[in-house]
Image (tube, helix red, strand yellow):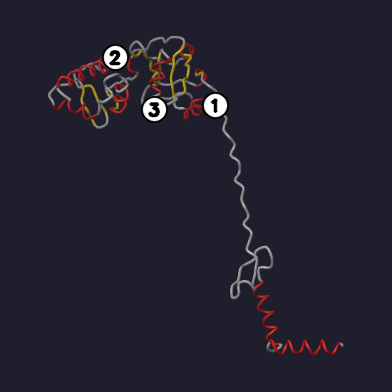
């Protein structure tokens, strides 16, 4: 990237961070910092700036452009002497918008909106900006309506952030309006298939033994006793001869 393009990038980033962060759906913490990842997500949505990487932000300082910000670890921060953000308490419009991850909906409906891990919850005047912010984290975020004036009447503070956003430290659930929770599908219990134990076939598998759990588990012992009893009667040819004599004696 040539110096001319770096100058354009510096001018663009100065506008985003120092003048109109609300226009891009971001806000700086009160020390003038924001995570580099969050800043890049916002500026890459702008036509012609999708190529910007963290390395380009570092190059601005190395090339001697004297930017109004510096990189500190995973964050980018306004340098000393540059005016830090100020968010005055102001009355909000009747309705504000916020988009959240679908998986967070159950928690929000139980405990409300809380600014984790940051200090404030970003709330937008327009649906479009709220959805734009939400799509940076999830393809199909859930859009929530915030009854801002009702919340203010019960002591919830709202801080103005430029022309397009408000910030708040908490929004109780009773001031949040959104879609119903999706019904959870009941998990069907898994059918356990009982495996049939192999039958004992001693004659087909000579010298082998298969445990039959359905029938007598001690068939091998019975088989051995049977063979022992037959062996006590003498060899097979003698037993056959005795059988023949008995048959002849009957006739």
Image check: 240 left or right of 20? right
Question: Is disc 3 surrounded by few (<14), some (14 to 19) or many (20+) residues within 10 Å?
Answer: few
Pick the residue in front: 72 or 6.
6
Q: Which residue is mark 2?
A: 20
Pick the residue in front: 206 or 225.
206
Residue 2 position within the rendered picture, expressed as x and y whole percent measured from the top left: 15, 23
Q: Residue at x 62, y 47 (%)?
A: 191
Pick the residue in front: 127 or 227.
227
Q: Which residue is mark 1?
A: 181
Task: Place residue 125 in its image quadrant.
Answer: top left
Secondary structure of residue under mark 3: loop
Location of the N terminus (image quadrant): top left
Secondary structure of residue under mark 1: loop
Q: Which mark is residue 137?
A: 3
Q: Are marks 2 and 1 in contact (CB under 8 Å)?
A: no
Question: Is disc 2 surrounded by few (<14), some (14 to 19) or many (20+) residues within 10 Å?
Answer: some
Instruction: Give the spatial CA distance, label 1 vs label 3.
Output: 20 Å
Pick the residue in front: 52 or 100.
52
Q: Which mark is residue 219?
A: none
Q: Residue at x 69, y 86 (%)?
A: 236
Instruction: Give the spatial CA distance, label 2 vs label 1.
Output: 35 Å
């Amino acid at each position: 990237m040539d110096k001319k393009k770096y100058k354009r990038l510096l001018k663009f980033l100065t506008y985003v961070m120092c003048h109109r962060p609300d226009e891009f759906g971001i806000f700086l913490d009160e020390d003038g910092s924001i995570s580099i990842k969050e800043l890049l997500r916002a500026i890459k949505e702008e036509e012609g700036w999708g190529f910007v990487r963290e390395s380009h932000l570092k190059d601005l300082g190395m090339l001697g452009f004297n930017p109004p910000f510096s990189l500190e670890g995973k964050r980018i921060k306004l340098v000393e002497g540059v005016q830090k953000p100020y968010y005055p308490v102001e009355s909000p419009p009747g309705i504000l918008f916020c988009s959240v991850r679908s998986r967070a909906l159950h928690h929000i409906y139980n405990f409300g909106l809380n600014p984790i891990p940051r200090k404030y919850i970003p709330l937008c005047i327009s649906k479009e900006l709220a959805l734009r912010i939400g799509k940076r984290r999830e393809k199909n975020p859930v859009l929530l309506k915030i009854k801002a004036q009702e919340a203010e009447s019960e002591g919830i503070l709202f801080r103005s952030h430029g022309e397009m956003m408000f910030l708040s430290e908490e929004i109780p659930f009773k001031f949040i309006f959104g879609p119903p929770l999706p019904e959870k599908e009941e998990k069907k219990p898994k059918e356990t298939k009982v495996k049939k134990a192999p039958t004992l076939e001693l004659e087909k598998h000579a010298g082998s033994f298969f445990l039959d759990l359905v029938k007598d588990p001690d068939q091998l012992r019975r088989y051995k006793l049977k063979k022992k009893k037959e062996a006590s009667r003498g060899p097979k040819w003698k037993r056959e001869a005795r059988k023949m004599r008995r048959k002849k004696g009957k006739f």
